[in-house]
Image (cartoon, grey):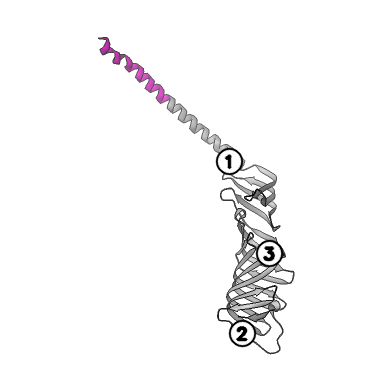
Amino acid sequence: MKSKNFPLLLLPIIIVAAVSFYYWKIKNEKTVHALNPRREELIQSSHDQKFDKFSLSGFDYTGKSSWTLEGDTAKIDPGQSVYLNQNVTLRLRDNTLIRTDHVQWSQDGGTLRTDSRVEVDHQNAKVVGRGAFGKPNEGFIQLNRDIHMTINNNTNLVCQGPLKIFYNLNTMSFYRKVKVVDAKGILSANRMDVNFDADKKKIKEIVAIGSVVIERGADMTRSNRAIYTVDTGSIRLEGNPEVTLHKGTTEGILDGTFRN
């Protein structure tokens, strides 16, 4: 008899344990749900936090600083984006300095964005444009549109944009209706790559690509590609060059000799 009644004696205990577990589970689920709004509250409150003289830095594989991003004020949103405002500057290792009024820095991917006016001081060239996107850790900055670069105070380069700066490679690439203007003439193309000498801190070469036109007074040349070398002062035309010369005209843009 004892052996037959033993399972029946356990039944109330099992029922009580099951009911207790059920209520314990409900209680803990309510506790978890009650914590979530509080967590969202805390995250949301960080959006209103402001910081003065906020600074971010990046480092290369050797541990040396490769860039510094600073702003007079900053706010952090729930998505961990940092909004820097007023006197925002990005200083690169080669002393290139980029200035604007507002930048959104995303921790995810290490990217920066702005729709504001941007000014760049790069070696012996100054550039202004509207809007920018960049990945400082990858050595890349882009100015989006309305680009105007001044070279050595007497040569102007304009384009619709974008301008892509690969500062680890000492190269700038200008896109869409690119035009170089100085007292000697006009050089226009679909795209221009400006290559800098890292040691001498000056432009060493300009490569014009696509529908290249060089106007020197009444003289004009057309080609698919043109390479101007600063040290030699020569311009090499590539891709079915056409040259139209008029007697008595003065030396033209970049003061170079033609060869192909």
Question: In percent of the image, x 69 and y 81: which residue is there?
Answer: 252
- Relative depth, front residue between 7 and 118: 7
Looking at the figure, which quarter contains the C terminus?
bottom right
- Disc 2 element: strand
Give the label, 3 or 1, closer to the camera.
Answer: 3
Residue 129, position as x, y percentages in the image: 65, 63
Give the CA separation, mark 3 to mark 1: 38 Å
Give the CA separation, mark 2 to mark 1: 66 Å
Callout 2 amino acid: Val
Q: Residue 44 — which label?
A: 1
State the extent of the magenta-drawn residues as a range.
1-23
Label tally: 3
Task: Give neighbour class at mark 1: few <14, some 14-19, many 20+ (Cα, 10 Å).
Answer: some
Residue 44: image quadrant is top right
> Tag 1 or tag 2, which sits nearer the N-term?
1
As displayed, is residue 84 above or below residue 38? Answer: below
Callout 3–callout 1 Cβ contact below 8 Å? no
Q: Which residue is mark 3?
A: 127
Task: Give neighbour class at mark 3: few <14, some 14-19, many 20+ (Cα, 10 Å).
Answer: many
Give the CA separation, mark 3 to mark 2: 32 Å
Question: In percent of the image, x 68 and y 90: which residue is there?
Answer: 247
Give the label, 3 or 2, closer to the camera.
Answer: 2
Q: Which residue is mark 2?
A: 243
